[in-house]
Image (cartoon, helix red, strand yellow):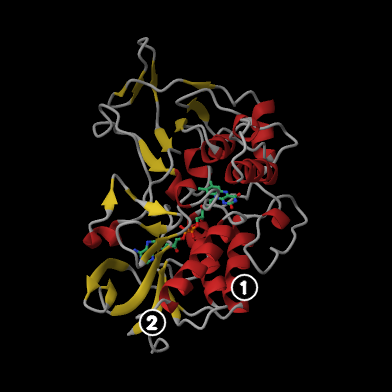
Amino acid sequence: MSADVIIIGAGQAGLSVAYFLRRTARSFLLLDAEDGAGGAWRNGWRSLRLFSPAQASSLSGWLMPATTDGFPTRDHVIDYLTRYEQRYQLPIARPVWVHSVERDAHGLVVRSAERSWSARAVVSATGTSRSPFVPTYPGREAYRGTQLHSATYDRPEPFAGQRVVVVGGGNSGAQILAEVSTVADTIWVTERPPRFLPDDVDGSVLFRRASEQWKARQEGHAVTASGASLGDIVMVPPVVDARSRGVLVAREPFRHFTESGVVWADGASAEVDAVIWCTGFRPSLGHLAPLGIVHEGRVVVRGTRSVDEERLWLVGYGDWTGYASATLVGVGRTARDTAQEIEAYLSSPGMTTMAAPQ
Ligand code: FAD
């Protein structure tokens, strides 16, 4: 099986690269581990909503259909991504788990347990959702309560009547705290004091501000800190409600676990039934290990292209692969640049075009 380009991952980033590759004569195929469309959105919790309105959350080419009841829900995003694949008739093989990308005499070989694909260029768009991060804490293994990461959190009901620690000061932490605190007694633990956006500022304002900064930086102008200093947490309705209930009070990280709870540096302690880790994710890059280019969880890139493997591009992993590239509205710029760079590379003298994928 061969194609000019193999895209590993058919979440928003992979779809965006495919949208631009469609404009070239290159053969390409997306491989994705999920049973259906939607990427990480398939694993978001039931009440998860975007933190920007639909019109500020679209992939290139097709505006996300508007919603009538606030920001788009997780299911609205999954439906949009499903229809996006169909609209552009993107060739996707799923479920396929890619366990390795290797070099051979002709190019790169992408392998799953059952098959392999030869390619002249590979795009890794595997996101982060499959690599949840939990910080190390002394005694965590001996703690007998429930522990789960936001990646597997679904709804508040199972925590009813319990005492729950929510760790993490980002949007996940604030939204899950807001929800769980309606049924349980909660303690919010954040590394630094949480930074809330003004109520009238949603993700689209953040993105617009930060775009201005990105453009100013590209043009060599000094950049004010206005966008970055705005804050992190978008005041979506459930978080506003939590604030009115006095729940949005965070305390510093505890020092260690006991079998039944946690202890702070000042000796204060709390018996807790559960800990929900809203401590983020790391890039899912295990499939790239055979290339010997992953160092401390990242790949050195120029733009999105690997510096150490010229036939490999990485898209959608956040700012190190392009400003705001981990967002629906932000990934298009780097996806377009990636497709153009691949086309230029495959058109360079001495490169032969692969047959269409069989
Ligand atoms: P993913 O969506 O994770 O897709 C990667 C795909 O690759 C998945 O289908 C995965 O199964 C597959 N894959 C991974 N490894 C392999 C492998 N080895 N072989 C084959 N397939 C593989 N973004 C916004 O734009 N707006 C928001 O409002 C917003 N809110 C968010 C709220 C929360 C709580 C969180 C956690 C994220 C939010 N995001 C938001 C970010 C957004 O969800 C992610 O950044 C986005 O899903 C990343 O897209 P992606 O295509 O890079 O990765």
Query: Which image quadrant for residue 351?
Result: bottom left
Give the crowd class for mark 1: few <14, some 14-19, many >=20 residues within 10 Å. Answer: some
Q: Kindly identify which numbered label has been placed on residue 3.
A: 2
Q: Residues within 10 Å of mark 2 (few under 14, many from 20)?
A: many
Q: Residue at x 38, y 79 (%)?
A: 349
Residue 163 position within the rendered picture, expressed as x and y whole percent measured from the top left: 46, 29
Location of mark 1 (residue): 83
Q: Residue at x 72, y 33 (%)?
A: 199
Q: Quadrant of the C terminus?
A: bottom left
- Mark closer to the chain start, 1 or 2: 2
| Residue 343: percent from left, percent from top | 47, 74
Above or below: residue 88 compared with residue 45: below
Q: Is residue 94 visible?
A: no
On residue 222, the disc is none
Please tell me which residue lies in front, 170 or 346.
346
The picture places residue 18, in percent across and down from the top left corner, at 52, 72
Q: Amino acid at mark 1?
A: Arg
Left-right relation of 167 to 51: left
What is the secondary structure assignment of the residue under circle 2? strand
The CA span between labels 1 and 2 is 24 Å
- Res. 16 in view: yes
Q: Nearer the viewer, residue 32 or 22?
A: 22
| Front of the two marks 1 and 2 | 2
- Kind of residue at badge 2: Ala
Callout 1: SS: helix
Residue located farthest toward the right when viewing the structure as drawn: 68
| Mark 2 vs ligand 1: CB below 8 Å | no
Closest to the observer, 145 or 237? 237
**Where is residue 144 shown, x and y percent of the image?**
29, 33
Q: Is residue 288 left or right of residue 325?
A: left
Picture quadrant where residue 149 is located: top left
